[in-house]
Amino acid sequence: MEVKETYNGKIREATIGLGDTAVTVGGETSLPLYMFEGAAPNKPVIALEVYDTKPEDWPEAAIAPYADVLDDPVKWALKCQDEYKADMICLNLASTNPSTGDRNGADIAPIVKAVADAIKIPLIVYGTANADKDAEVMPKAAEACQGKRALIGPVEEENYKTVAAAALGFDHLAAPHSPIDVNIAKQLNILITQLGLAPERVIIDPTTGALGYGLEYCYSVMERLRLAAMTQNDSMTQMPMINQIGREVWKAKEVKTSEADEPAWGDAETRGVLWEALTATALIMAGSNILVMRHPKAVELTRQFVAALTGATN
Amino acid sequence: MKTHKVTFYPDNRVAEVADGESVLTAAIAAEVHITATCGGDGDCGKCRVIVDDGAIVTKQTPKVSDEDAAKGYVLACLTSVTSDLKVLVPPETRLGIVPEETEEAVTYGKMMTAAEEAESLDAITLDPPVAQFFLTMTPPTLDDNASDTVRLTRALRQAGVDEPVIFKPAALKEAAVACRQEEWQVTATVRRDPEQALVTMLQPGDQTGRAVALAIDVGTTTVVGKLIDLDTKEAVAETSAYNRQISCGEDVISRIVYSQRPGGQARLRELVVDTINEALRRLLTAADMTQDNVVAVYAAGNTIMQHLLLGLNPKYLREEPYIPTATTFPWVRARELGLKLGPRTNLYPLPCVASYLGADIVAGIVAAGIPTSEKLSLYIDVGTNGEMVLGNNEYLVSCSCSAGPAFEGGGVKYGMRATFGAIEEVLVDPTTYEPTIKTVGGKRPIGICGSGLIDALAEMFEAGVIDAKGKINVDLPTDRTRIGPSGPEYALAAAGDNGADRDIVITEADIDNLLRAKAAVFAAVMVLLDSVSVSLQDVDRFYIAGSFGRHLDAARAITIGLLPDLPTDKFYYIGNGSLWGAHNSAISREKRAEIAATAARMTYLDLSTNNKFMDGYVAALFLPHTDATLFPSVKTGARA
Ligand code: FES
């Protein structure tokens, strides 16, 4: 006997970018990957990270694939697009972090514009999650990529009025970021939609924990968001979700430690790639729609997993 | 040891204290009652006084602004006496008197009227646990040679006393004379417990018709007492006073903390006993009676108040797993507790359920008739703790949550109790953002009380001064919202408005405290409903008890998501349910038994480790609530 659940909820579809290369995510009518109970018209997509400045703290294995482009965000983004076939680019404005670069909005606006203009695939622009700093930087960044319908994040409780308003004003989407808490995720969605941003332009960033670093908390919060969306038809949870995976995985001790320091742990690259792919696949099962990743080989593994699950061929 | 004289104005009371003692200690010694919400830890900033003359050593504190410091304001608890002093206690710091309850019409729901109170008294058959019986006996003869006590027992049987009769030694001693003095006519005072009738006093002749009982609600903030005529069942006098323990902290937790200081527990008992004695003195004067008329005392309070009154150490009520010494208590001699009553007068402490669910609540739900009704009722009493009970004649579940002192004006910069000068009503114009305020007694505004805070929050939310997270929009075209010394704030009264001598503002931190308080209460309500799988809509009657509930504008409380969004015809205010239950106990053995049985059959849910509570709490930290479907009327603005 076949037991099937029917759901009264549905995840909204959200489209990032414009024209032929726009990417649509969401639209599920069942719990994640319950393809026997509903439809999942859009596959999870993968965005590759690009930093606005040469990263200082990446382990060797993560540097290697980008060694020739790390100084130039535009070339870096094009490499991700053309060589590694990213679905999207996530431009991380790391240099605005007050404790490191502390560059301001005017400094990074030209970089955002250059990257946005260079790539064909959709753009995600992320600040440093410093609420005050992002409130200054993100409106400038949003302005710089006006006309691209990018995804702007993170929108925090403390700065939603500025950051979400910038997304609204410059016709982008917004990624509200909540601290692994279903209620706060909902509250932030209510607040930013009350500002006038359509719920179809909201992608939830529920906070990502890497494998071994809170993945299970992240998983259960995402699962609860999806249960609320599907079984309770809770409108303020029915948005697609984004996970910042690369950033979290590649700072884990198990990933950063070199083989020389821990011979028993084996090859550092393999370790890092598997760590990232495992985190990504777990989050796909939890309902992630946009996976922001770092290592091309981890992306490859994750794509194979998606293909196997959805029966799609890549 | 060097001592100094500290004189407090305007009361003109003096205390002699040791060098280095705090001004707060001096005030307690001088019986000047100062608001000390945090119990003297320097945290609440409420114990503001002005030192007029004399030498002091005071600790710097951000709780007193530089401007105020320049005017001579210090915190009494952080200031030590180093010479003779003159201290002025400003109005916002004084404990003051409890304003008379006015029979205000409530705009949302239904208030129990005096007529209904009388009607409910009528329905109770007079049968007091401590009663006086006028007995007439046949004199003994050589043939009928039964002892005095046998004769008395026979007479009591005839009067309807069918429990085994026991004589207290004091009564025995006076039996011989009492029986014979008025030709075998005596008045027996009898305490009737389910298992026995205890004769406590024998007086010659007919002394009945003059007996009263004292019913008291021992509240954390307010003590309310009534003298009850044991013939008519009615109250002959009523009075209330602030619990003098307030000088040792506003809420039950700070009282427990205080009780653990050297001499703290004894001090707290003394203070509450003083409060009761003062109330008693006023009651006896009003009723033109003496202590001899009082045959029994019935005290209802929360579990901590019951412990402190009885001299039981409350320490373990606060430590996991939160166990009280007792939840049912024996009769105790009133005089042993320090009450100014006759040596034979006993006090009955009404029974509690758990450390944070006390006799006040049990008494209240019985007074509301919940344990015998088929209707599903939700009973809630909000103060520094929110206590609630859900149930009917089949089951009763209860829980409590710490709401913090915000609703009593604590933890709020300009918060105060609902006494004269407290802003109790607020309107905010949605176009100009200008407030309109009303104060208790129409006096010059000196602070904001709980109901004023709820009003302000609801109005600010509806006018768009704050968002659903309680954040103040400082970009509005008004100078009412601004960045103040402690962050964003909204000025309810500017110095000069309505005679205010300082700006009275609500800060974002105040709003956070209020949000936390309301979120705890609402989350607890939801956990209670969930525990028996019923929904809000299944609730037939929603009872609001307590003096806070009485002043509360329920419609506003719904707007901020403190109270559930139920139609007006389900709301009932029962005022002081605790006192009402004590009154019932005083006139009816059946009621007293019902209260005991109710306490015994109540289920208590501990929320301290309840995940659903934590989750519901975060969901409720939003205006009105993260789940807007729970508050349909707030969204549409159309309340039934
Ligand atoms: S600050 Fe003095 S009693 Fe709280």
Image (cartoon, rainbow, N blue to C red):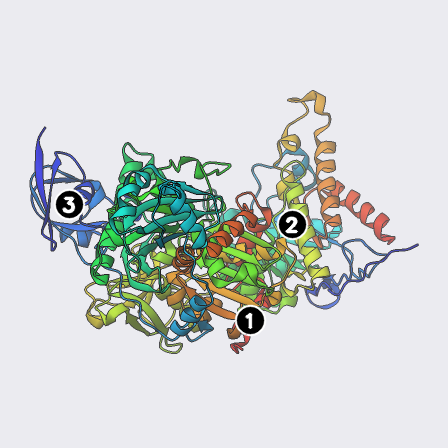
Q: Which residue is mark 1?
A: A196
Q: Identity of the amino acid at label 1?
A: Gly
Task: Pinpoint the chain carrying mark 2.
Answer: A
**Residue A2 as seen in the image, left or right of residue B16:** right
* Residue displayed at 28% across by 51% down: B183
Query: In the image, residue B545 lies at what x, y percent?
Result: 43, 61
Q: Say which of marks 1 and 3 sits in front.
A: 3
For mark 2, give the secondary structure: helix
- Whether labels 3 and 2 belong to a single chain: the reply is no
Disc number for residue A221: 2
Lower position in the chain sequence, tag 2 or tag 1:
1
Q: Say which of marks 2 and 1 sits in front.
A: 2
For mark 1, give the secondary structure: loop
Task: Pinpoint the chain carrying mark 1.
Answer: A
Mark 3 closeness class: few <14, some 14–19, many ≥20 residues within 10 Å: some
Query: In the image, residue B51 lies at what x, y percent?
Result: 12, 48
Q: Identity of the amino acid at label 3?
A: Ala
**Residue B537 higher or lower than A177, as above or below:** below
Camera-side residue of B585 and A146: B585
Disc number for residue B392: none
Disc number for residue B30: 3
Q: Marks 3 and 2, how far apart in space?
A: 57 Å
